[in-house]
Image (spheres, rainbow, N blue to C red):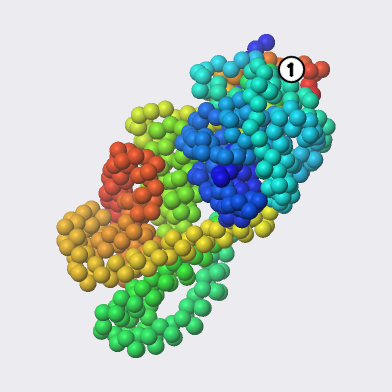
């Protein structure tokens, strides 16, 4: 038995889905949060039913890949649950009537966000709507879980609609239905409305955007640093290090196992930045250096997502993105990419044209450092001063701008214009923000942590087998002459294919000058995506475009590395 | 007088008369509720060539300037307002 949840974007399908199945899925307040199919199961009158959450779509004629997936999935449905935003009944009914006309699976209609209709002065006669549509209609509030029980009970009453119930063009029929079931009462503007208007209309909107971005950065740094200085570092220093020292004694410093697990001791001590054993640097990097920033970043991102600010930022940034051959909504993959490039790459499914997909994916993979990489760049450079961290990020930003401009000129194809529904502001619901944070942390621990450990293990094995030496020899002209790096930096470039955070960490034991550290950290960001992003990009772009994209990445790394090294030495850094 | 959404002034109410452009463009706009007969209110046109923000029903929609030029509207008289 398969139950498919379908509906317009941003009506709360994912929230209803997690209520039905108990599955943990990411839900936010902007259209296009879900770009993949998510499957879960539920008990349903002693039956096991598979429930599928699909990307939102406005109609049965898909305009992008995410919608295509959603519409295709309908053919497998035993029951279709059509989720509607009750505050936007008129627009949402279009898909409902299409489903009634064109599909012959049992259908049930869910009016979600029912609680919001009251604040907005919308009165819907649910029973009348049920009669007019000829299928069961249930009112729910996904966030609080109201109405979900009724939905489960009534699933069995879902039945095949009669297409003859719809006479004439769909929009005429919708007008007829709306006239009969919906009454609007006038209502005064609330504080939220005023705030909504202010964050769209310049010049205030620009101040608000600047303030939101600035405070987000400050808070992310504050929480991240706080967690490191007061929680993770003391834990590692005071509790974990003594344990490891015992192990080190037991293993003997010269054994292979010692160099694999503990790594090199620095004058008899473990140095988490330099030792490079699986249990030392391998655990320290993901847990003490990266995880705190993952926590703080995703906490703030979750709040902004649920508040509904991202679509506003997209509108304000639209002009800038146009110059890069994109439109404002490309801010979504970029911001998600700042957390992790994988969801960033997946979000390019929201674009319909090949050109904008290619540009967005390539720019994101090249110039948007993931939080793991950012955290390690901070870890690497902070001791020398914040200005050096700034140089790395301003370089990445300039690459993003210039490369985007070039690609918009030279990549063939069209760049469509923005057409975006702007959801109302909603007060973030603490429980769902924390739940979403937990999903993302959990994902990092499950997916990234093993890769980091593997990465550190491979570093040791490659050095042991002298593979790094071999590649260093081959690429030494590029490394030394063009980028001004020692040929030993090759090890970091090799590991960068696997994990960027470990790769940035590998620069530390090389005793590089500050200029070399800056150039090395920047190149590690530019030259190639990590393996997880790479796999997703191949799937999203196809082999041919992926090869082109990689050609862009590699040549950018060569050119920018050279220019950065030259200009830094000109500046005397 | 028939003008495009792009020419509409901020805060004006209007009724959509026709949507020019290809079938895909029309379909996209229609699925967001922008079609002949829709009552809209222009909230703001951003900068000189930025997107235009309108309200149709209870939905706020941002559309690029080029798209906004394709949606032709007629100003609503006071007594036609809801």
* Quadrant of the image occupied by residue B76: top right
The location of residue A416, given as percent across then percent down, is 47, 29
* Residue at the image position 34 percent from the left and 62 percent from the top: A503
Q: Tell how many labels.
A: 1
Q: Is residue A167 above or below residue A451?
A: above
Q: Classify mark 1: residues with Cα within 10 Å, few (<14), some (14-19) or many (20+).
A: some
* Residue at the image position 78 percent from the left and 30 percent from the top: A128
The location of residue A126, given as percent across then percent down, is 77, 35
The location of residue A43, given as percent across then percent down, is 62, 53
Which subunit holds the residue at mark 1?
B
Disc 1 is placed on an element classified as loop
Q: Is residue A224 left or right of residue A480?
A: right
Q: Quadrant of the C terminus of chain A?
A: bottom left
Q: Residue furthest front?
A: A46
Q: Quadrant of the N terminus of chain A?
A: top right
Looking at the picture, tell me which residue is in the foreground, A65 or A198. Answer: A65
Find disc 1 in the rendering and name its residue.
B76
Q: Is residue B63 visible?
A: no
* Residue at the image position 68 percent from the left and 23 percent from the top: A165
Q: Is residue A423 left or right of residue A449?
A: right
The location of residue A50, given as percent across then percent down, is 55, 48
Q: Is residue A313 left or right of residue A478?
A: right
* Residue at the image position 51 percent from the left and 78 percent from the top: A235
Q: Is residue A571 above or below residue B19?
A: below
Looking at the picture, tell me which residue is in the foreground, A531 or B45. Answer: A531
Q: Residue furthest top?
A: B1
Q: Is residue A501 visible?
A: yes
């Amino acid at each position: 038995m398969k139950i498919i949840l379908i509906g317009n974007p941003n009506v709360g399908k994912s929230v209803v889905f997690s209520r039905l199945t108990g599955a943990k899925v990411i839900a936010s307040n902007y259209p296009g949060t879900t770009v993949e199919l998510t499957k879960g199961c539920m008990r349903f009158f002693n039956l096991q039913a598979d429930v599928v959450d699909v990307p939102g779509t406005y109609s049965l004629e898909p305009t992008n890949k995410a919608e295509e997936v959603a519409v295709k999935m309908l053919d497998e449905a035993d029951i279709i649950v059509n989720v509607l935003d009750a505050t936007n009944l008129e627009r949402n009914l279009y898909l409902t009537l299409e489903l009634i006309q064109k599909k012959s699976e049992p259908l049930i209609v869910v009016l979600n966000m029912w609680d919001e209709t009251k604040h907005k002065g919308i009165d819907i006669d649910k029973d009348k709507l049920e009669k007019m549509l000829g299928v069961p209609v249930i009112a729910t509030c996904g966030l609080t879980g109201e109405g979900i029980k009724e939905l489960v009970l009534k699933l069995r009453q879902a039945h095949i609609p009669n297409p003859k119930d719809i006479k004439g063009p769909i929009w005429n029929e919708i007008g007829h239905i709306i006239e009969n079931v919906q009454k609007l009462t006038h209502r005064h503007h609330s504080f939220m409305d005023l705030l909504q208007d202010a964050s769209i209309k310049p010049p205030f909107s620009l101040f608000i955007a600047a303030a939101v971005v600035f405070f987000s950065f400050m808070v992310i740094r504050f929480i991240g640093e706080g967690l490191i200085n007061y929680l993770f570092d003391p834990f590692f220093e005071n509790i974990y290090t003594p344990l490891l020292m015992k192990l080190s004694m037991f293993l003997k410093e010269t054994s292979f196992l010692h160099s694999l697990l503990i790594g090199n001791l620095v004058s008899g001590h473990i140095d988490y930045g330099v030792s490079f054993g699986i249990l030392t640097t391998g655990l320290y990097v993901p847990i003490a250096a990266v995880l705190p920033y993952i926590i703080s970043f995703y906490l703030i991102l979750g709040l902004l997502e649920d508040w509904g600010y991202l679509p506003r930022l997209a509108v304000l940034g639209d002009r800038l993105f146009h110059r890069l051959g994109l439109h404002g909504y490309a801010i979504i993959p970029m911001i998600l990419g700042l957390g992790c490039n994988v969801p960033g790459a997946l979000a390019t499914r929201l674009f319909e044209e090949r050109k904008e997909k290619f540009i967005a994916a390539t720019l994101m993979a090249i110039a948007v450092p993931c939080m793991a990489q950012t955290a390690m760049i901070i870890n690497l450079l902070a001791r020398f001063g914040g200005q050096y961290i700034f140089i790395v990020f301003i370089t990445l930003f300039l690459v993003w701008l210039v490369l985007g401009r070039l690609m918009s000129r030279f990549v063939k194809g069209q760049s469509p214009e923005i057409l975006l529904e702007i959801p109302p502001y909603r007060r973030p619901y603490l429980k769902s923000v924390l739940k979403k944070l937990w999903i993302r942390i959990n994902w990092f621990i499950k997916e990234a942590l093993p890769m980091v450990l593997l990465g550190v293990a491979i570093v040791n094995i490659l050095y042991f087998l002298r593979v790094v030496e071999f590649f260093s020899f081959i690429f030494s002209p590029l490394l030394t002459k063009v980028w001004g790096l020692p040929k030993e930096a090759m090890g970091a470039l090799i590991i960068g294919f696997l994990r960027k955070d470990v790769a940035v960490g590998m620069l530390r034991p090389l005793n590089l000058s500050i200029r070399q550290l800056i150039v090395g950290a920047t190149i590690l960001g530019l030259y190639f995506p990590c393996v997880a992003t790479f796999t997703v990009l191949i799937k999203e772009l196809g082999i041919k475009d992926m090869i082109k994209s990689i050609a862009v990445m590699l040549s950018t790394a060569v050119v920018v590395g050279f220019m950065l090294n030259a200009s830094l030495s000109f500046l005397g850094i | 007088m028939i003008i495009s959404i792009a020419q509409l002034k901020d805060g004006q109410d209007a009724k959509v008369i026709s949507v020019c452009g290809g079938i895909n463009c029309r379909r996209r706009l229609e699925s967001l509720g922008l079609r002949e007969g829709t009552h809209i209110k222009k909230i703001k046109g951003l900068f000189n060539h930025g997107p235009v923000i309108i309200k149709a029903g209870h939905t706020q929609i941002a559309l690029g300037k080029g798209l906004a030029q394709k949606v032709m509207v007629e100003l609503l008289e006071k007594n036609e307002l809801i």
